[in-house]
Amino acid sequence: IAQFNIARLRHPLGHPLTKPFEDLIDETNARAEASPGFVWRHGIDTRAPDEDVYGDPLVTVNLSVWVSVEHLKNYVYGGFHRDVFRRRKEWFDSSGVVLWWVERHERPSLEDGKRRLEHYLAHGASGTGFGFRDAARFPG
């Protein structure tokens, strides 16, 4: 399963109120990569100005592939990431996530994730993209 998520920062990178989030990025990514069911993560680093996918430096993105929805859910809502996730309102105004099934060796692009999230937000859950709550309706 692929997942693409975005979040819009309340304050720019480098701002004192964003620093706690920035300090957690590398550890959060490392823990994801060491998690059961993790397959691949796009190497984008939203701290790098040349990797601004949305033309807005306040928007952060993440794209990864997992063996199953359950593996991804266990990471997102468990342990270290759960604790970081609970603090999201400190750092972000808004966020969005979309999931979709990919072939075993497929590595989706950021543009694919962006397109699928836009479709999901505009049209709701479908085979093009869905949320965690919709996953049972769209088995892989």
Image (cartoon, rainbow, N blue to C red):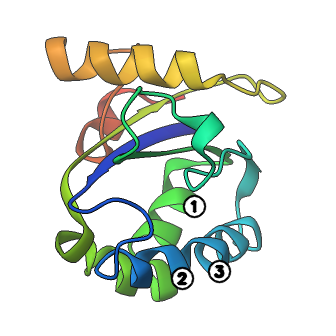
Q: Which quadrant of the rendered structure holds the N terminus?
A: top right
**Spatial separation of the CA atoms under disc 3 and disc 2:** 8 Å
Identify residue for label 1: 71
Q: Secondary structure at mark 2?
A: helix
Q: Amino acid at mark 3?
A: Glu
Number of marks in the rendered image: 3
Compare marks 1 and 3 and give the one earlier in the sequence.
3
Quadrant of the rendered image containing residue 6? top left
Residue 127, visible in the rendered structure? yes
Q: Amino acid at mark 2?
A: Asp
Q: Note whether 43 is above or below 122 in the view shown.
A: below
Badge 3, how many Cα within 10 Å: few under 14, some, many 20+?
A: few
Identify residue for label 3: 27
Badge 1, how many Cα within 10 Å: few under 14, some, many 20+?
A: some
The reply, left or right, for residue 126 in relation to residue 32 is left
Q: For the point 49% across and 70% down, which residue is it? A: 74
The reply, left or right, for residue 136 in relation to residue 35 is left
Q: Secondary structure at mark 3?
A: helix
Looking at the image, which residue sits at the far right?
105
Of the two numbered discs 2 and 1 in the rendering, the one whose residue sits closer to the viewer: 2
Identify residue for label 2: 23
Q: Note whether 28 is above or below 111 in the view shown.
A: below
Residue 1, visible in the rendered structure? no
**Spatial separation of the CA atoms under disc 1 and disc 3:** 18 Å
Q: Which quadrant of the rendered structure holds the C terminus?
A: top right
Quadrant of the rendered image containing residue 86? bottom left
Quadrant of the rendered image containing residue 88? bottom left
